[in-house]
Image (tube, helix red, strand yellow):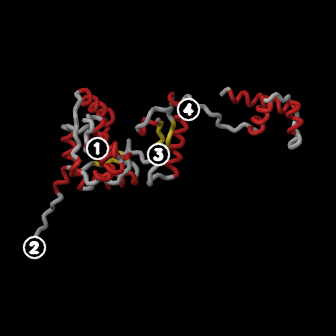
Amino acid sequence: MTIKKNDKAYLLDLKIDIHANRDIHYQELALLFDKPKFLDLLPYLRKNYQVVNFVPLEDFREELENYLQEHFLKNTEVKIDLSKYTKVAEVKESFPEFYDFLNGNPSNYLPEMLDAECNLICFEFNRPPYFVDAIKQAVLCGAVNDKYFKPTKAIPIDSFFFGLWPVLEQVAIFVSPTSTYEDVEEEFRKAKELMKTDKKLSYYRPRIDIAPNIRNYRAWYWKRIKGNTYRKIADEWSKRDIITYLEVLKGVQAYEKLLKL
């Protein structure tokens, strides 16, 4: 009997530990990080980004900042080996500016190249960008969790988020094919809380309850601006709905208060 050689045994040394509370997150993470093609990338990635020792998973965010700051201060130049990827031509065609960046035009440095290559990996394996932090965990920690894995997420963004000129921040809820209504509802609540607590969003304070008769108030307000008396406005309006001049007066005053918010 011939014993078949296990030609994948070497992958055991590259296996990524996965810690996720939700089964759907566990599945998404496992189906990327158990791909032999992804695991084969890890030695190159760790060498390219000078990862010598693994970072404890629980300290990932803090240690990542320290790691990036250290290499930023050293002006560590990084070149991506595009030969490792099969979809470079598609990237070049669909995202030419991103391709130029990946290709080192001009020369680029850590930390931006780590982020760029993780995005390239997402494209290579048909995964959305919310995998980027998990990929960084796999490279730096040898393990991943779903603490920063957010297929559905409410975050403040400005147009720098998309690489454009700066504008005032807004809150966006990002969704994925795995997002559920419950996920979106939870992030919606977080978005509402952000609007109350984030100082960068404090400029936007809309009135969230609808004033009664708001359409009438606005119409009366502009008739007053035009010079009509409250009584004249009431008399003309009474051809449709019976109102008094006091109702018009109170309505205009209410609208003027709203304009001061």
Q: Could you tell which of marks 2 and 1 lies nearer the N-terminus?
A: 2
Q: Nearer the viewer, residue 226 or 235?
A: 226
Helix, strand or loop at disc 3?
strand
> Label 2: few (<14), some or many (≥20) within 10 Å?
few
Q: How far apart in space, not on screen, are marks 4 and 1 (Cα)?
A: 36 Å
Q: Which residue is mark 1?
A: 117
In the image, what residue occupies the spot 33% across and 43% down?
98
Q: How far apart in space, not on screen, are marks 4 and 3 (Cα)?
A: 19 Å
Which of discs 1 and 3 lies nearer the camera? The answer is 1
What type is the residue that disc 3 sits on? Phe
Q: Could you tell which of marks 4 and 1 lies nearer the N-terminus?
A: 1
Q: Quadrant of the N terminus?
A: bottom left
Q: Which residue is mark 2?
A: 1
Q: Which residue is mark 4?
A: 196
What type is the residue that disc 1 sits on? Glu
Q: Could you tell which of marks 2 and 3 lies nearer the N-terminus?
A: 2
Q: Could you tell which of marks 4 and 3 lies nearer the N-terminus?
A: 3
Q: Quadrant of the C terminus?
A: top right
Residues under numbered marks 4 and 1 in contact, where contact means CB atoms less than 8 Å apart: no
Q: How far apart in space, not on screen, are marks 2 and 1 (Cα)?
A: 46 Å
Q: What's the mark number on residue 174? A: 3
In the image, what residue occupies the spot 28% across and 51% down?
88
Lateral position of residue 140 relative to residue 242, left or right? left
Residues under numbered marks 4 and 3 in contact, where contact means CB atoms less than 8 Å apart: no
Q: How far apart in space, not on screen, are marks 1 and 3 (Cα)?
A: 22 Å
Q: Nearer the viewer, residue 163 or 255?
A: 163
